[in-house]
Amino acid sequence: MNLKKIRSNKWFQIFSNKYMLVTLAFVFWMLFLDSNSWLIHHELDTEIDDLEKNKSYYLNEISKDKAIMETLNDSLELEKFARREYFMKRENEEIFIIEHQQED
């Protein structure tokens, strides 16, 4: 008697339909198990977003470096840059590098 009551239920009839079962199985397969699943697309989309952020960062760095390169056309500016960034010196000079210790 209980089984007849369950089978007469509207929702049971809908979900026990073979077309509905095949459709649900297909949707589950496409969302989670397929090689082109939604999960993989979501991972790829986040990776694309990260790469686009990296691209914008590096384009910004390139523009900064180009601006620095344009200022280095003058030999005095080039010497100043080499001394500051690469600790270069003339033959008769000595360089002392003073490092400050940070307190923790």
Image (tube, rainbow, N blue to C red):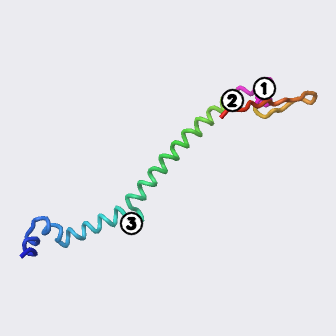
Q: Earlier in the sequence, mark 3 or mark 2?
A: 3
Quadrant (top left, top right, bottom left, bottom right) of the N terminus: bottom left
Q: Which residue is situated farthest in the front direction here?
A: 104
Quick check: 7 above or below 100?
below
Q: Earlier in the sequence, mark 2 or mark 1?
A: 2
- C-alpha distance separating marks 3 and 1: 59 Å
Residue name at image x 69 percent, y 29 percent: 68
Give the percent coordinates (x, y) of residue 39. Answer: 40, 58
Asked whether the residues under the numbered discs 3 and 1 touch, taking CB atoms below 8 Å apart as contact, a structural biologist would say no
Q: Earlier in the sequence, mark 3 or mark 1?
A: 3
Which residue is under mark 2?
Answer: 68
Residue name at image x 81 percent, y 27 percent: 79
Which residue is under mark 1?
Answer: 80
Image check: 10 left or right of 95?
left
Q: Which SS class for mark 1?
A: helix
Quadrant (top left, top right, bottom left, bottom right) of the C terminus: top right
Which region is colored magenta? Answer: 71-84
Q: Which residue is situated farthest in the right direction here?
A: 92
Quick check: 79 above or below 58?
above
